[in-house]
Image (spheres, helix red, strand yellow):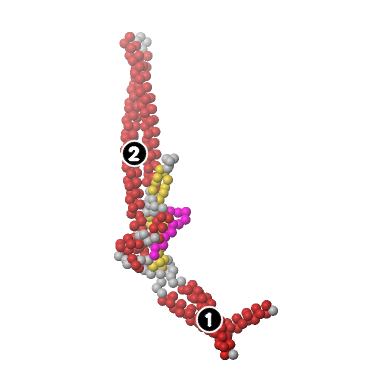
Amino acid sequence: MEENEGEIELIDFLNIIWKRKWLIILSTFFLVIAAGVISFLLPPKWEIDALIQPSKFLIKTAGGQYEEIVIIDPKQIAGQINQATYNNKIAAELNLDIRKFPKLKAEDLRDTNLVRVSIKEKDVEKAKLILLSLFNLLKTDPDEKVEVEMKSIEEEIKANINKLNISKQRKKEIEKEMSAIRKRIESLEKEQRLSLKKENRSESESLAMLLYSNEIQQSLEYHNTLNELLSTKKIEEEDLNLEIDNLNERKGRLDYAQLIKEPTSSIFPVFPKKKLIILITGILGLLIFTMLAFFLEYLEKQKAESKA
């Protein structure tokens, strides 16, 4: 019995919808047309976005290694932008009315040091100017820190290059001195061999041979000392070259704030979304006018009952 009552109620509902179908259909149709016209009359807005990379810096870890970090955390930058921290400065710079200033939206991109900033605006060129102004504000202070570090590294490189040049000059002097000693040793050895060929040597010649031997020995010892000093200078030169390479690598890893992606407009307007507006209006219209049809049917029944 309950099932039959349920079927009757469902049929009653369908009858009411069928009875007032033109009210529902025509009213929804005109509402959709009105929504479509309004959406076409609304000024379109484009989304203009840019990708910003904050200034990068190097810090020395406890292990003596250099770790690359950004001067200002991308999350912090995105938070400041979303809180309208820079709006007044940008408006003053571009001579804009702060009351009509468009909303800036920012997010830090996951697993990167990049910040995406976007604006929805009717005037594309105005939005681009706002984003460029924002970028200039974001880069000023951090870039000054990078500049200080850059100059410090360049001074270290210059000092090491001077040391390297001095070391190279000293190495040449040692090599020249070693060459002269080798020639002197060869000359002494030659004179010594000539003396040895004589069968009957005088006492003075024997003494000269002894002196040759002592001088040769001393020259060899001095030559060895110079050779050790030359090896030290070569190691020093290698260390300085390595230090200069490391400094150049550090310098190369420093980065000023960059616009990874210049302010760019979307191909199509992002507002109003005409198709979505029409679809939602159509669904809501059907629901509203169907409820209105039931309400009118209810009023009609109430009148009929009151007359009876």
Towards the viewer: 107 or 242: 107
Name the side, left or right, on which 22 lies relative to 132: right
- State the residue at coordinates (32%, 39%): 159
Amino acid under disc 2: Asn
| Residue 84 seen from this side | yes
Instruction: Using the image, determine if residue 174 lies above or below residue 91.
Output: above
Q: Residue 292 carries which label?
A: 1
Name the side, left or right, on which 115 lies relative to 29: left
Name the side, left or right, on which 270 lies relative to 180: right
Q: Position of residue 69 (x, y in %)?
A: 41, 49
Quickly name the residue at label 2: 160
Give the Cα distance between marks 1 and 2. Answer: 87 Å
Report crowding for label 2: few under 14, some 14 to 19, many 20 or more residues within 10 A (C-alpha).
Answer: some
Label 2 sits on a secondary structure element that is: helix
The number of numbered badges drawn on the structure is 2
Q: Is residue 26 magenta?
A: no
Report crowding for label 1: few under 14, some 14 to 19, many 20 or more residues within 10 A (C-alpha).
Answer: some
Towards the viewer: 124 or 103: 103
Residue 158: quarter of image: top left
Stretch in magenta: 103-114
- State the residue at coordinates (30%, 62%): 93
Label 1 sits on a secondary structure element that is: helix
Q: Position of residue 183 (x, y in %)?
A: 34, 24
| Residue 49 seen from this side | no
Name the side, left or right, on which 129 lies relative to 24: left
Towards the viewer: 307 or 118: 307
Looking at marks 1 and 2 on the same chain, the residue that comes earlier in the sequence is marked by 2
Q: Position of residue 187 (x, y in %)?
A: 34, 21
- State the residue at coordinates (35%, 52%): 142
Q: Nearer the viewer, mark 1 or mark 2?
A: 1
Mark 1 vs 2: CB contact within 8 A = no
- State the residue at coordinates (38%, 24%): 224
